[in-house]
Each structure stands twice: as structure tokens, then as C-alpha cells.
Amino acid sequence: MNAPNSALVPVLKLERISRSRASRPAVRDLSLSLEAGQILGLLGVNGAGKSTTLSLIAGALTPDSGSIQLQGQDFLEHPELARQAIGWLPEAAPLWPELTIREHLEAHGRLRGLAGARLKDACDSVLERLELRDLSRRLAGVLSQGQRQRLGLACALLHRPALLVLDEPANALDPVQVVALRKLLRELAAAGTAVILSTHQLTEVTAVCDRVAILHEGVLRHDAPLPTDQHSALEKAFFDIAMTKAA
Amino acid sequence: MTLFAVTRLELRRLFVRPLGWTIGALALAELGWRFALLLQLFLLNQVKLAALPDGPGYTDLVAVRLYSSLITGSPLPFGVTELALLVVPLLTMSTLASERSTGTLPLLFSTGLSASRILLGKYLAVLIWLTLWLLLAIALPLSLAHGVTLDWGKLAAATLGTFLTLAVLGAVGVACSAFASHPAVAAVAALMIGIALNCINLGAQLAGVNSGFINWLAMSTHQETLLRGMVSSADIVWFLLAIAVALALGTQRLAADRERG
């Protein structure tokens, strides 16, 4: 397995992936690629296929057809690539309620191949970055929604992945934390991390993303850089798509 | 290795949950009571037993009988095996069923781990917990080792038999947890399968049939041989086979879960 030159290949490349759930097509013929340092906003109404797409990218689901390339390598043949290359925050940040914040980070770190001093440094770094240091001994089961969300984000960032996959990351965050999250995402992108951000909030997309994709009934209906007049143009594109039936 | 990361995570979850501590401590307290009663019976009969050539000693009447009621004539509190039928389902019920209900199972899948490694990692953690529990149980008869003559070979065979029984029950419990959506369902299923495995030959035994497929199928048949101090590879193969079947079924279910999403 020879890794291609990372400067020449996109971090992520989806080619015509399809996936059915509960006997209904959730994602159909989706093709997409993402370069290092890009922040892609994934928009769509409820049931558009956003979470399924993110689960496919994160490796939690396998597509029925199509191919996924991660840093130039076949992700479906080598699902272990996800261990170090992808950080995933699923919707509602699933946690183990009986473990503390620090124990969560340590468990995630070990699952992602970190150990010893590297693991400790990584935990300290994300605790600091997401302002969780003072809560590090608190059990996940007693955290507020916002704190749970920040812990989920910390787990996704811990191993410094090349691709960050975030499902509604601003959920339950207060306005100050939302601004901090935007700043963090811009910093990560500036450092070369590719980010996919799924959200219902158009303002989230216009605030941080440099590209937007709109899914509707499992089909990619729009994939382009953000319009220059941003919010109103995006709002028009979104509602034009959301109010129509998929082809 | 990420397999051990799963084991470590599961062990941590087992040790921080009050349920594990509570059932472990209560079961040990009950075993302590059984040990005291067995010791009392042994002391009452010591003079008579000393007169018998090749009569049973401390190992047969106290140490081995602590493990199971299979070869105990007297009505006594549960031995390790009977307790394990209750303790193991309670211990294993959350291993995968709670991962499914809290939504953390997809997170484990997203680390690139195969279903078999996730299941094996969880099983190893359960096995470590059960081994520690068994070691604490053995400590009871061993605490008097300096004052009695122990038949170390027989004790080792009986301990091996009990360990393998715990290992089978653990594998069944983890497999049931892989199939169930709720931990309580997993516990009930594991309890019923454990009882069935132990007692499936009861009818045959009552009819005086001590051989045949139904007796081979029962776990008690194979454990009893080991409790009597006889180590046979056929019995060990049965235990290993039972563990492999349970883990294979659990893995298959987990892999199907991943496919279905």
C-alpha cells in the first residue's frame, strides 16, 4: 500500500457512492472531493442524507456502491485509514456516561493509536483548547448539552486528523462558544485540516465555510464555492433546491 | 494495539460501574458463607473421614465443592458456577447493548476496527473481570492451605473447569449483548441460555441415561469431569467450541449491524 504524494491528491474523494437505509435510498450517486484546508458546508433539510453521508465518510457505514478515496488510498479496502486520518463528531455527541472527560479522551486516543506521552500531550492540548480542563474529572453523564458537544469535538480533534467530519457541531453551544468554534475551525483549516460541516444553520455555513454542498433527497444538488454576496445568495439557492422534488 | 484499547475501555467501564462492584462483592460474600458451611461440615466429619482409607479430604469436601453444587450432596448456598449463571449475564449485558443504545457503537466502527476485534476486545475485558473474581473465590480455600493437605492437581483441574465454565458463560453473555437492543433483554437471554446449557441433560439423567448427544451437549457434563480432577482434551475442546460458536454468532450480528447502519 503506497501512499501517494499528499500534496497532489485530495484529502477525500467520493465517487458515485450510494447507500440505502431501511430499504430506501438515503444517498444516491454522490460524488464529491475535498482538498486540504477547505471547509465544506453540507446543507440539506431533515432526511436529505447528510448524516448518512457523514457516517459513510467517517467509516461507520459502508456504501452499497461507489468508491471512497482517503488521502489517495481506497478507504473501503483499508478502513483502518480512518483511525488516524479522520476525526468524527456524530450528531448529539454519543458518550459513555460512566467515564470522565479525561477518560473519554484517553479511550479515544488509544482507539486512534496514541499512547504514552503523545496521548497525554494530546489530551492536555484539547482540554485546554476546548476549555474543558477544569471539568476533566467530571463524568460525561452529568455534563450539560454544550459541554457534551465540546467533549465530542475534543474527541474528534484529539489525534489531529487530516479530515474533520462534524455533524451539527454548534448544537447546544452558547453564542460565545459558537464564535470560539468558528475561530477554531478557521485555525484548523489554516493548518491544513479539511473540514466537512453538516448543519441546518445557513449562518454557520456563511460564517466559516469556503464551499457549500446541498443535498436533497439523497442527491447532491449544488456544490460550489460560497457566493460572494454570501448569505442571501446561499439562502436563495438552498430554498430553490429544498422546495423542489429531486430529479 | 486497538484490540487492547477496546479491552481497556471496557474494563474501565466495568470497574467504574457500581453494578460490577456490587454483584462481585455480594457474590463473594455468599461464597464466603458457603465456604464456612462446607468447612463446618468437613470439621464435623473429620474424625470419621480420617478412618477411611483414601477417604475424601479438604480438597474434595471444601475447596472443589466451593465451585459447584454438581457434586455436592447437601443443600448449600450457591457455588461459583451457580452464582455465575446470574452474575455473568448482569456483567455482560451492557457490553454491546448499551453501546447500541447510547450511540457509541458507530464511533467504535469509525476507528476502522472489525466487528470481530471489537467483540473480542470486549470479551477479553469480561474474561479479565471473571478471572479476578475466580481468583478471589479461590483465595477462600487457599487461606487454610498452610494447615491442611491440599491435592493441588485436583484443585487445579477443578479450577480449570470452573474457569472454562465462566469463559463460556462470558462468551454467551457478550453474544447476547451483541444481539439485544437493551441490556435487560441481553441479561435475560444470557441467563436462559446459561441455564439451558447447564441443565439440558436433566431429563436424560433422571431417566438414568448418562451418555449420548444430549449429555455431550450439556456444559455440566464436561465441568463435572474436571471437578472430579480428570482433565480430558475432549472436555476442553467442548468448552473452546462453545466459546468460539458464541463469539462467532456475536461477531456476525455486529458485522450485520455495521452493514445495516
Image (spheres, coloured by chain):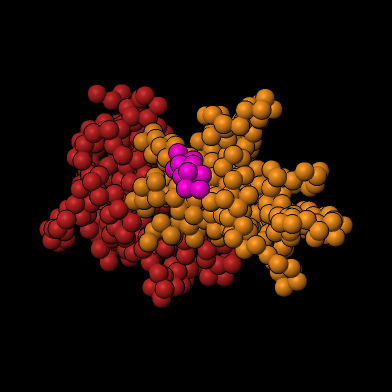
| Quadrant that contains the N terminus of chain A | bottom left
Left or right of A145, for residue A45? left
In the picture as drawn, the residue positioned furthest to the bottom comes out as A117
| B243 drawn magenta | yes
As rendered, which of B67 and A191 lies closer to the eye?
A: B67
Give the magenta part as a residue range: B232-245
Measuring 85% from the left and 60% from the top, which residue is drawn there? B47
The residue positioned 39% from the left and 45% from the top of the image is B115
Between A115 and B33, the one nearer to me in the picture: B33
Quarter of the rendering occupied by the C terminus of chain A: top left
Q: Is residue B99 magenta?
A: no
- Observer able to see residue A13: yes
Which residue appears at 32% of the width and 42% of the height? A56
Q: Is residue B200 left or right of residue A164?
A: right
In this structure image, what is the colour of chain A? red
Q: Is B215 left, or right, of B261 in this rendering?
A: right
Looking at the picture, how far across and down is residue A35, in whole percent? 20, 54
Q: Report the residue that reaches farthest toward the right.
A: B44
* In this view, A58 is above or below B131: above
Depth order, front residue of A36/B123: B123
Q: Residue A107: give x, y in percent of width and height.
A: 47, 61
Q: Main secondary structure of the magenta part?
A: helix
Q: Is residue A42 something one can see in this rendering?
A: no
Residue A101 picture quarter: bottom right
Q: Residue A78 location in percent, x, y?
A: 25, 50
Q: Position of residue B230 (x, y in %)?
A: 57, 50
> Chain B takes which shade in the image?
orange
